[in-house]
Image (cartoon, grey):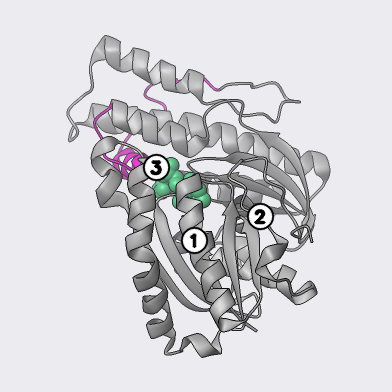
Amino acid sequence: MLVLGIESSCDETAAALVEDGRRLVANAVASQVPIHARYGGVVPELASRAHIVDIVPVVQRCLDEAGLGLAEIDAIAVTAGPGLVGSLLVGTEFAKSLASVLEIPLVGVNHIEGHLMAPFLDYDGPERISGTPDFPFLGLVVSGGHSHLFHARGVGDYELVGATRDDAAGEAYDKVAKMIGLPYPGGLYIDRAAKSGNPTAIRFPRALPQKDSYEFSFSGLKTSVLNHVRKNGTPPHDSAEFADLCASFQEAVVDVLVTKTFRKARELGVQHVVISGGVSANSRLRERALQVASSNGVSVHIPPIALCTDNAAMIASLGWHYLADKPRRFDAWALNARSSMKMGPPAS
Ligand code: KG4
Ligand code: ZN
């Protein structure tokens, strides 16, 4: 079964073709980074307008890459939430129209669940870590909008066991980057700048260190960086002090994410840890996760970089599970922009 995935929840317009939920046939993404870069974050109105411009060319690019036509698509899966309402609407309305014209089933899926299941795709990008996980696993989804820990027992069977009280990890990266004059998306630029820095140069705080707490909090860390640069100024971008500042901030984020994730995995007795979402592209997070996993005797699974940040392959793959179960028509689901949007099979 060939599923076309459509993703437009934030600032990437994406289309992908996935066969039987696993095999990635084609993957196309139009990034809006140049549009939002000078604002230091995503501007919702500009995002929805760019989705309108990009959606048809991106789907066409995806079909061209696969050498296939619309007639070969068996079903469509689209991100139905959470996300920016105007952005989501572009993808969902496009998907409804296309499914209606082609007379094929359509399923709306949860974006966070898409990230969580991304390591199941058979796509061996160079940076894929450890292949496909087994259930049950502990999943950390860290992106611009979410820092969630899930105990995943099967497709559609998840328990939320931790989340952030305030900023998401990616949001903290983006805000700190803006503070110190780095462009959007901040995570990528801080990651690069931190490579030559000393992560112990400045001791930034680790929030909620209690052993039984699986909540995250990044706003105190952000304020701490702000106080530091107010007091000391922002060092020149090409200086060793700047690399140290980036590396020290990054270490505080990664330390908390890795410590809490692997502690929870131990507590639950699970053998597999999944890390996904835009921040899972981070080189230090990957390095630390691999170290801690090997010393704990568990395996860690992280998608290749192209499937960490927003993409439609994870949406097509997840959608297939629900379509394969019970094919649904597009009137069986509704758009839901809230982060409380239900995960698992769509309500019929
Ligand atoms: O999953 P994603 O593409 O979109 C959302 O669902 O939010 O994640 C975007 C986030 C941004 O905050 C960006 O700064 C962060 O992922 N990010 C990174 C890296 N690459 C992207 N954070 C840390 N290190 C990176 N290498
Ligand atoms: Zn995302």
Residue positioned 64% across, 59% down in the render:
109
Mark 3 residue type: Pro
Dot 2 crowding, Cα within 10 Å, few <14, some 14–19, many 20+: some
Residue positioned 64% across, 61% down in the render:
108
Q: Which residues are magenta?
A: 180-206
**Label pair 2/3, CB-CB below 8 angstroms:** no
User: Which residue is disc 2 drawn over?
Assistant: 334
User: Which residue is disc 3 drawn over?
Assistant: 44
Q: Measured along the vertical axis of the image, is residue 284 above or below residue 301?
A: above
Q: Position of residue 34 (x, y in %)?
A: 25, 50
Q: Quadrant of residue 2?
A: bottom right
Front in this rendered view, residue 17 or 281? 17
Residue 186 part of the magenta segment: yes
Q: Earlier in the sequence, mark 1 or mark 3?
A: 3
Q: Measured along the vertical axis of the image, is residue 341 above or below residue 118?
A: above
Q: Position of residue 87 (x, y in %)?
A: 45, 51
User: Which residue is disc 1 drawn over?
Assistant: 91
Mark 2 residue type: Ala
**Label pair 2/1, CB-CB below 8 angstroms:** no
Front in this rendered view, residue 37 or 330? 330
Q: Secondary structure at mark 1?
A: helix
Q: Earlier in the sequence, mark 2 or mark 3?
A: 3
Answer whether residue 72 is visible to the viewer in this image. yes
Mark 1 residue type: Gly
Front in this rendered view, residue 112 or 263? 112
Dot 3 crowding, Cα within 10 Å, few <14, some 14–19, many 20+: some
